[in-house]
Image: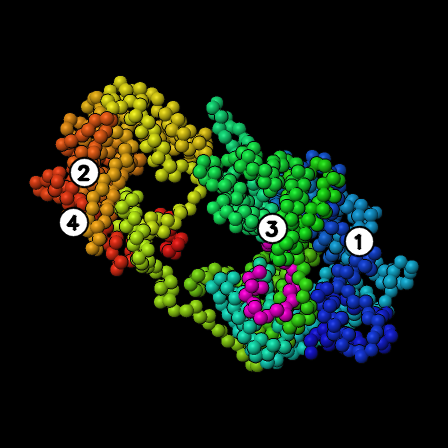
Amino acid sequence: MTFLNQSAQYIFEKHPLAQLKNICVVLPSRRAVYYFKQSLAKLSNVPFIAPEILAIDDFVMQMSGVNQIDAVSLLFELYEIFKKYDPEVKFERFISWAPTLLRDFDTIDLYLVDNPKSIFEYMSEAKVLERWNPAQLKSGKPEFEITPILDKYFKLFENIYNVYTDLQKSLTDKGLAYRGMAYRILAESVKQLLIEKNENSIIFEKYYFVGFNALSASEEKIIETLVKTNRAETLWDADTYFMSPEYNHKAGMLLRSYKNSGRFGKWNWQTDELLKGEKQMRIIGVENATLQAKIAGHIYAEAVVENPEVPTVIVLADENLLHPVIYSLNERIADFNITMGLSLRGSMLFTLIDAIFELQQNIAEFKTKDGGTVKMPKFSHRHIFKVLNHPFIRRYEQIKYAPEIKAKSQERTVFRKTLSEILRTNKVYLSQDEMLDLGENEPIFKILFSRWSDNPQKALFAFYDLIDELRNVYRDSNDAIETEYLYLFLTILHRLEKILFQNRELSLKSFKHFLYELIKQEKIPFSGEPISNLQIMGMLETRCLDFERVIILSVNEGTIPSAKHINSLIPFDACIEYHLPVHSDQDAVMAYHFFRLLQRAKEVDILYVIPNGEGLGGGGSEKSRFILQIENELVKANKNIKLSYPKINFGKDTEIEVINKIDIFKNEEILQSISKLIAEKGIYPTSLSNYLKCSLQFYFDKIANISKREEVDENFGADVFGTWIHNTLEKIDKDFGPKISEENIETIIGELEKRLDDAYQEKFGGFVVESGMNYLLKQVAEQLLNDFFENQKISQRFPLEVVQAEQLIEVIFEKIIHGKLQKIKIAGRIDRIEREGKVLKVIDYKTGKVVAKELEPPKDLTLEETLVESDKEKLRQLWLYQYLVTKSMLDGKLVLAGEKFENYVVTAKIYSFRNLKEKLEVNLSFETDPTIFGFIEKSEEILTQIITELLNPAINFTQATDTKICERCDFRGICGR
């Protein structure tokens, strides 16, 4: 029999049916009230008027004759009173500690502190100094100076008592009270309000207090007074295991003191279920928090097959697991009830609200020419992407533009166009006008990207407009939860609007604080069968309830019991002196709830997250001390408990290995794509190196055409920085070439800053270069180019001939490959070509450091082997550049600066901007007696060998064996490296 069934039967049998209406039953929670009513109704075959059955908070409010003030109104009430004592108090600072102060007021009243003033005096200047060093007060003066900050701190506590009394008077005049205040009112007037008959009170013949375990001082006084006058009885849900002094169990710490004191009358009742009852208990360690939900769903699905009628509860110590648990239940399990409510704070709508606040509150800081800074309200690209890619907005986009998307599959919506344009122009910050222009009159753009400044009313009406716009789209959808979230958010805004108009000085920061406070309090209540066989609850909702099958999740330290932290302005020693609750009391309460839940259960599954170090991937804190008590104490005391430790099977390692290995087989379609790529687009040095390093990377990039993830870069990456340098040099070469004199070099050095700025504006106008890392990189770029041209003055013969800058060179030849004639195009963009006598120097700029060793073949490899097998990427690039220019010259197609070049010696050279003094020039050959024809023939032989492999259907595209290559790969997320 459950505790509530037993309690209902006891009360029912003690009173005639007609007299039940004259009694009042008080329980810890509204959920317990519902179950008690169900139990009571089953005891009679005829209708009867039920007793008054109330949760303790409802009982106190009803009997004390006051209405409970809501949290936000209470904060404003407190603020208005506080301003009388500290006119300079800033609202933004006030709300950072006011909720903590109100919780302390609530606790002081709940625990009936006789002289509240003494607590605040305890924290006053004299007492603090006395506790710091009593010897300093002998002379009447402290040995150290009270600073203005300390003085302000102490005066805060001197004023708090006055604020406390004024707040109570103000609320009393309005017939309002906060929770603790209502408890004090009832406790101090029990006889007048609950015993003595008068016109304003509702008097019951008998009161029953059922299932309590941790009473505040006010609750103790209310119950004790009623028991002494023989108007009340208490019914306790206790077990010998935690009540016995032998075990000295924390779960029974408070109950033992109540029983021993005798203040609450006869002790009803005490069971031996934990010490004698038969139980099947399993303790299961899992690798991560979310996996617990999967296991809980699996456990219940198996249990339902065996016995579908057994009352079961899944208890979520961590309420963030509610969503995962719901989705982990078997689809055939439709009959279940959730008592927790779905938190708006944990919803996708809240993440959108939070993203919009980030968007609106962003302030960009720019440097001015005179060295100062200016702050401007601009939208950051990060926040824009976060908002426009949010699931709520994407859903809006898909529903609203569905007809257009279906009609024109290639047509991009205004949302996608906007994001693409930001990427294309690399805009880091955008103004309101820029975003509205990109929005093309889309209503939601006007809502999201119209500036609020510091006006909370603009924010409020923007959210109203957002709800209206989203509601129009979601009206026809079947997503009930999203629609409910929108409605709930609307009701919160209505509440805030009343506050806004009453308090004109509210800032945007304060508005956000209150909005979030209200959101934190709101939950979507689930409608379901309250007495269905499966209940999903938080730990506190289980009070007084019993289930045969119990599944508890997140039984880890810091969760059950919670971390040792009480948010209060009252010091620990003051709490001890004034008998206020401390963290050990919280632990005792949680211990009671946990072990009481096991009391009448027959099957118990306890899940915890394996701590780091105990298993692969473990991420939890230590398993709860409650598990240790079960293992080391309860199981030894009760031989009827069968304890086991099931292991979770994740599959064999070999299966995981297979999943991570990727092979792309070359079917006919892929082979045709490769052939077309080689013949038409051509093979470039970078793509050839990518293929030799990792053929899978080459496949993703060139064959599958998977786009690399595009992002707006706030700082110059290595590629952007290099392109900036290259573009600047290209413009210089074209403006001053083909023959550059020493005087030209001096002119160029003097113009470097302007030329860098011009190249930046032309290509990278979206970057911010006035401050931060980009500003430093700009200085670096200027210094690198200055060093480069200074080095040119020393090392070059003048005039320096630059016959071409940024030249695209393509050559074509044909070979029979796998029985087919294959056209092969090799191409490359060369940074610069210099002429020195009858030598053409093919130049490649490198902004990073290059040393001569990188251009030398390893001793154990020939040049041919080096170009195909080694990681000498820079050498391979110079080889291809030398080949391209030599081949073009031999074919009579090398025309540079209007001049045809023939019979020149071609060399390849790197200018390393971080190593300008080192000679990095090569003239590659494969023979001891090299000729142009021999070089070209051998080069094409090597290229044909690589392309033959590329077109071989028996050789798959596979991952690189060297995982270091994967560290900077754009596709590492796809292959899981």
Callouts 2 and 1 close, C-beta under 8 Å: no
Callouts 3 and 1 close, C-beta under 8 Å: no
Whether 314 is drawn above or below 797: the answer is: below
Amino acid type, mark 1: Asn
Measuring from the top left, give residue 62's x and y in whole percent.
Answer: 81, 59
**How much space separates mark 2 and mark 3, taking CA atoms?**
62 Å
* Residue that label 2 marks: 887
Q: Secondary structure at mark 1?
A: strand
Specify few, some or many for label 2: CA neighbours under 10 Å numbering under 14, 14-19, or 20 or more. many
* Residue that label 4 marks: 861
* Residue that label 1 marks: 67
From which residue to which does the magenta span run?
323-347
> Between disc 4 and disc 2, whose residue precedes?
4
* Residue occupying image coordinates x 62% and y 76%: 310
Specify few, some or many for label 1: CA neighbours under 10 Å numbering under 14, 14-19, or 20 or more. some
**How much space separates mark 3 and mark 1, taking CA atoms?**
32 Å
Amino acid type, mark 4: Leu
Amino acid type, mark 2: Lys
* Residue that label 3 marks: 349
